[in-house]
């Protein structure tokens, strides 16, 4: 972990006794109180704390829901209604869990967008970034399996459509794709058997995410946080201790975000869902228009934009995997888009592209929607494969401050010691 | 201690390699039951074959039955529908395999290879879109039947003709014809 002097002093006999045997309090103190945070981080740097909070919310409410939910084809649909109507505070637990998933994704998209804008994926943060992509994939798998559990029409058909993605392997090795799909289903079609195993995995994966989050934070605390300037912490005046500075900022941002969360939980619990999911699953009737939850819409649009089944599936997965390669695709020597006058515009074009794909993913796959989905899918990949490498080489970055302190106080300002405990210069 | 052989390896090297290999293979074998338990179980595989009485299905009508948890479309095709299906050239097809479980993979997707001889009006297929597994529309009279008069999958816009062959849209294969036979003039056995 990052080397900085610990201000930890065990005060009572128990702390001293423990410190000599398992210095966990010392470690936590070093990593979450003394840890040097860049003094210029803005509110976008509160999303990590938000995400930890929502992982906690999902785990806690999920454990409660599992006490009342029945993972069988016959009972699943009714047990969710039972939770909402009969279980004490069941409505609150269910609403927090369902809305919490949406808030989790909203926060993760801001978190990823911040990383892309400020170049947080660039050396030495490649491993940190890639673990983040892995967490994102785990979140998607967890959310997908969780969505199957209410066993409504959208649940059932989403499972059917998404598990069938693997059957596209049939066009490379005939029969293999079908075998994989039947292995996932535990039968020849989506059934109660599938539901039960998805429930088991839905309970497991959040703990895998929690483990990956520990690695993510570990990697973060080795390389240190990025910041709006993209410069590293060089002197003590560039940083402040995490507590109370960053922690208090996190708590404030969390309080504001929780208001949004509460607004949905109490007033619009079903707004982000789909009404068809209040019809019990029926294997003989496909809803006229299958749409995933809002946070999957851009990928769904990419899947449908490509007329070939295998290539559509490959493009959908590639759209996420490609994020892992950004540390090497981006050739710019400047991290932060703040100092990249050309790339900045492409970044916002990319944001518009993702939002447009999300809109197109919610529309039926016909006419002009298909054409636009193809155009935006093309730009999505061009952004990574063409814009990132070429703009990085061609662009002249604008003048940058020499240090984080200068960015905050201006070039005339004397570096002021704000009382940070010695964060030694990085080497 | 250990006796060295000519190439310098000794008994201890052998024991180390043998122990690691043994543990490795053992772990791999122990993993298999944990993977295989997810495959379709004995009760699912034993799902009996299904007999269907076709007598009530009039000319131009269609019924859907469930077989192995999957919908099976049975359509009593009208003369025009059969003629439409027969008139299609192989060159116009997306998938040129008949996809008939009773015939080899290479069999061309002619209408005759997707029906039983002498019973050409009966088309029996698994009613699951080969794209991503939705149930295509076209079984009921009021359904949209797509640009080719057969079936239309509303999920991602695949059009099937009156022989259940993919003609337009993202689906890669023709609708699958399950193994079935006529046990009497008006009765079939699927599976």
Image (cartoon, grey):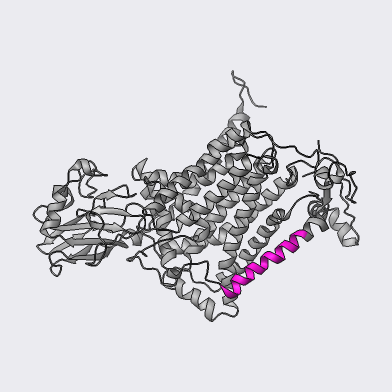
Residue that appears at 60% across and 34% down: B16
Image coordinates of residue A241 in percent, x first then y, are: 83, 52
Q: Quadrant of residue A405?
A: top right
Q: Nearer the viewer, residue B103 or A371?
A: A371
Q: Quadrant of residue A72?
A: bottom left
> Relative to residue A293, is residue A418 depicted above or below?
above
Image coordinates of residue A339 in percent, x first then y, are: 70, 40
Image coordinates of residue A324 in percent, x first then y, are: 58, 42
Q: Is residue A283 left or right of residue A146?
A: left
Dominant secondary structure (helix, strand or loop) of the stretch shown in magenta: helix
> Relative to residue A87, is residue A304 depicted above or below?
above
> Relative to residue A395, is residue A2 depicted above or below?
below
* Quarter containing the C terminus of chain A: top right
Q: Residue furthest top?
A: B6
Q: Is residue B168 left or right of residue A259?
A: left
Residue that appears at 48% across and 66% down: A149
* Quarter containing the N terminus of chain A: top right
Q: Is residue A244 left or right of residue A182?
A: right
Image coordinates of residue A112 in percent, x first then y, are: 62, 50
Q: Nearer the viewer, residue B56 or A358?
A: A358
**Can residue A169 be seen by looking at this rendering?**
yes
Q: Is residue B7 magenta?
A: no
Q: Is residue A262 magenta?
A: yes
**Can residue B33 be seen by looking at this rendering?**
no
Q: Nearer the viewer, residue A373 or A213?
A: A373
Residue that appears at 70% across and 58% down: A49
Q: Which residues are magenta?
A: A249-268
Q: Nearer the viewer, residue A6 or A25?
A: A6
């Amino acid at each position: 972990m990052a080397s900085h002097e610990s201000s930890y002093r065990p005060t009572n006999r128990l702390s001293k006794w423990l410190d000599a045997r398992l210095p966990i309090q010392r470690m936590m103190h070093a990593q979450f109180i003394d840890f040097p945070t860049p003094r210029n981080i803005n509110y976008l740097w509160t999303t990590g704390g938000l995400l930890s909070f929502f992982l906690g919310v999902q785990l806690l409410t999920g454990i409660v829901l599992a006490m009342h939910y029945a993972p069988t084809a016959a009972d699943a649909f009714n047990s969710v209604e039972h939770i909402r109507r009969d279980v004490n505070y069941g409505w609150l637990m269910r609403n927090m869990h369902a809305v919490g998933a949406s808030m989790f994704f909203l926060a993760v998209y801001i978190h990823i967008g911040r990383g892309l804008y400020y170049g947080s994926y660039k050396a030495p943060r490649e491993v940190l970034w890639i673990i983040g992509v892995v967490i994102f994939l785990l979140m998607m798998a967890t959310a997908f399996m969780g969505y199957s559990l209410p066993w409504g029409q959208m649940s059932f058909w989403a499972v059917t459509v998404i598990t069938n993605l693997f059957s596209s392997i049939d066009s490379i090795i005939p029969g293999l794709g079908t075998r994989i799909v039947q292995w996932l289903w535990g039968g020849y079609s989506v059934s109660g058997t599938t539901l039960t195993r998805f429930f088991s995995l839905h309970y497991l994966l959040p703990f895998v995410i929690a483990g990956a989050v520990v690695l993510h934070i570990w990697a973060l605390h080795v390389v240190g946080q990025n910041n709006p300037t993209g410069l590293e912490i060089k002197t003590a005046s560039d940083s402040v201790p995490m507590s109370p500075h960053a922690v208090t900022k996190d708590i404030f941002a969390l309080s504001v975000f929780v208001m949004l969360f509460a607004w949905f939980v109490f007033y619009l619990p079903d707004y982000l869902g789909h009404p068809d999911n209040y019809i019990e699953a029926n294997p003989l009737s496909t809803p006229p228009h299958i749409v995933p939850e809002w946070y999957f819409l851009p990928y769904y649009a990419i899947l449908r934009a490509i007329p070939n089944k295998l290539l559509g599936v490959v493009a959908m997965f590639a759209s996420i995997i490609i994020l892992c390669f950004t540390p090497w695709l981006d050739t710019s020597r400047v991290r932060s888009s703040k100092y990249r006058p050309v790339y900045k515009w492409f970044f916002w074009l990319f944001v518009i592209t993702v939002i447009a794909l999300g809109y197109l993913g919610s529309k039926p796959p016909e006419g002009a929607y298909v054409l636009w989905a193809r155009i935006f899918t093309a730009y999505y990949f061009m952004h990574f494969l063409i814009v990132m490498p070429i703009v990085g080489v061609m662009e002249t970055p604008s003048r940058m401050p020499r240090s984080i302190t200068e960015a905050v106080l201006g070039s005339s300002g004397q570096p002021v010691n704000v009382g940070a405990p010695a964060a030694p210069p990085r080497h | 201690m250990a006796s060295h052989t000519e190439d310098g390896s000794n008994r201890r090297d052998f024991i180390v390699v043998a122990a690691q290999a043994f543990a490795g293979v053992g772990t791999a074998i122990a993993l298999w039951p944990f993977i295989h338990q997810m495959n379709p179980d004995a009760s699912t595989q034993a799902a009996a074959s299904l007999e269907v009485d076709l007598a009530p299905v009039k000319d131009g009508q269609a019924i859907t039955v469930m077989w192995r948890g999957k919908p099976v479309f049975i359509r009593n095709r009208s003369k025009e529908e059969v003629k439409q299906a027969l008139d299609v050239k192989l060159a116009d097809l997306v998938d040129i395999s008949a996809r008939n479980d009773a015939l080899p993979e290479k069999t061309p997707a002619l209408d005759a290879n997707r029906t039983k001889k002498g019973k050409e009006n009966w088309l029996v297929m698994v009613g699951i879109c080969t794209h991503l597994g939705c149930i295509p529309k076209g079984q009921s009279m009021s359904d949209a039947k797509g640009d080719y008069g057969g079936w239309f999958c509303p999920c991602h816009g695949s059009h099937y003709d009156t022989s259940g062959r993919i003609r337009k849209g993202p689906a890669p294969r023709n609708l699958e014809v399950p193994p079935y036979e006529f046990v009497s003039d008006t009765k079939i056995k699927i599976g």
